[in-house]
Image (spheres, rainbow, N blue to C red):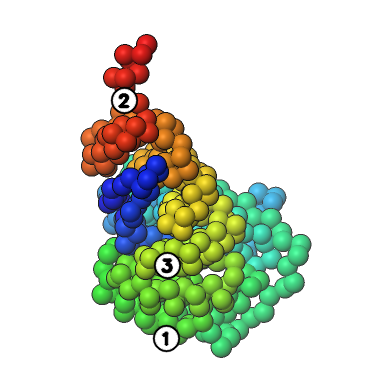
Amino acid sequence: MRQLRSLTLTGSRFRATQFVSLKRVYVGVWALAALGACRCARAQESGTQAGAFFNSGAELVVNVHDAAGVPLAATAMVHVYRDGATPSGQAATSDGRATFVLTPLGDFTVVVEAAGYQAARKDVSLPTAQRAQIDVVLRRDLSASGTSGGANSSGAVTGVPGKPVLAPKAKQAFEKGLQALGAEKLGNAEKYVGEAMRLAPGHPDVLYVRGVLYLKEREWARAQETLEKATQIDPTHARAFSALGMALSNQGKYDAAIAPLDKALQLDARVGWDTQWTLAKAFYESARYEEALKTSRAALEASRGKAPQIELLVAQSLTAVGRYEDAAIELRNFVKEHGDRPEATTARRWLQKLEASGKIKSPTEEARKQ
């Protein structure tokens, strides 16, 4: 994904032969896309599991309250995502609390849902092994029309309105599959996610994780098919749309990837900077350069320094719209700030081509004029 290809001169403009290979494996996404795995083990309140993993990870306790500040009496479902996209675990609350052990360390997004309440989310950074607690407040959803109980034809039990929760056996298989996927144990993930699919074939979260597993295995077409089903069943599943867009991008279907990626960001603007980055590249490959420029800049800002190579896409988009001097500023800044990265060689080569073509002036010429 980050192997940047060279720019060539076409008449008076620079054009990209093919900017970047999007054959990147996304575990989450968004996704969607390919990311370092994050293992998550669900811990009991006794902390026995936490003690087993704490040396290599961080324990996160999520306390869920109602608007009055009282621990939520209703059962809530807590989802944890690494970098806003990679599924890292989920658990139901007990007495308003859910506990996770997360490894590797990093930035996480916690999403909490409960029947009759508006969903809530909170970001937390866990850069070191530690025990951390966060408080999440759920507020009543006055538009909720009630819930229904019992298992339906998809193998799920209705909990959050419009958001089915898994029946016990399917839930157990799903959580084991999620942990195996995060631990890079793909064989075990296949086993448990496959079992969850057998028990709850129409559950959007199960389909989403199945699609993520296909992405991890580079089964792009199968990932696309599975994630399309997830988004059809749950048209509000932002991460499923993000993952679908990445599956399409990995197949070179850039025009088709734009709609689901854009939909993911409309549903949840914080779904992840990887989604913005992939959308920017899809815009670029579809010759929608102004949109590529705007979106790549947004992705660079949202990444908060985690993916400085996005600046090269910004530079390339500037070049495509004829803003050569601005592109040179971006490239020189990248070389200055990240000269030790492999992409710096590409940035230097692009600068040389821009100078050789007369599109920009070299620093030597500028100094001579002054």
Mark 1 residue element:
helix
Q: What residue is pinned by disc 3?
A: 253
Q: In the rendered structure, which disc, 2 or 3, sits on the residue that comes first in sequence?
A: 3
Tag 2 and tag 1, C-beta contact below 8 Å: no
Mark 2 residue element:
loop
The residue lying toward the viewer, choosing from 8 and 79, is: 8
Image quarter in which the N terminus is found: bottom left
Crowding near the residue tagged with mark 1, few <14, some 14–19, many ≥20 C-alpha atoms within 10 Å: few
- Label 2 sits on what residue type? Ser
Image quarter in which the C terminus is found: top left
- Label 1 sits on what residue type? Arg
Q: In the rendered structure, which disc, 1 or 3, sits on the residue that comes first in sequence?
A: 1
Distance from Cα at disc 1 to Cα at disc 3: 30 Å
Q: What residue is pinned by disc 2?
A: 362
Q: Which residue lies at the image location 31% right of the left edge and 32% below the top edge?
A: 355
Q: Tell whether 76 sits left or right of 124.
A: right
**Mark 2 or mark 1, whichever is nearer to me:** 2
Distance from Cα at disc 2 to Cα at disc 1: 63 Å
In the rendered image, residue 54, in percent from the top left (x then y), is placed at 31, 51
Tag 1 and tag 3, C-beta contact below 8 Å: no
Q: Where 81 falls versus 353 (above or below)?
A: below
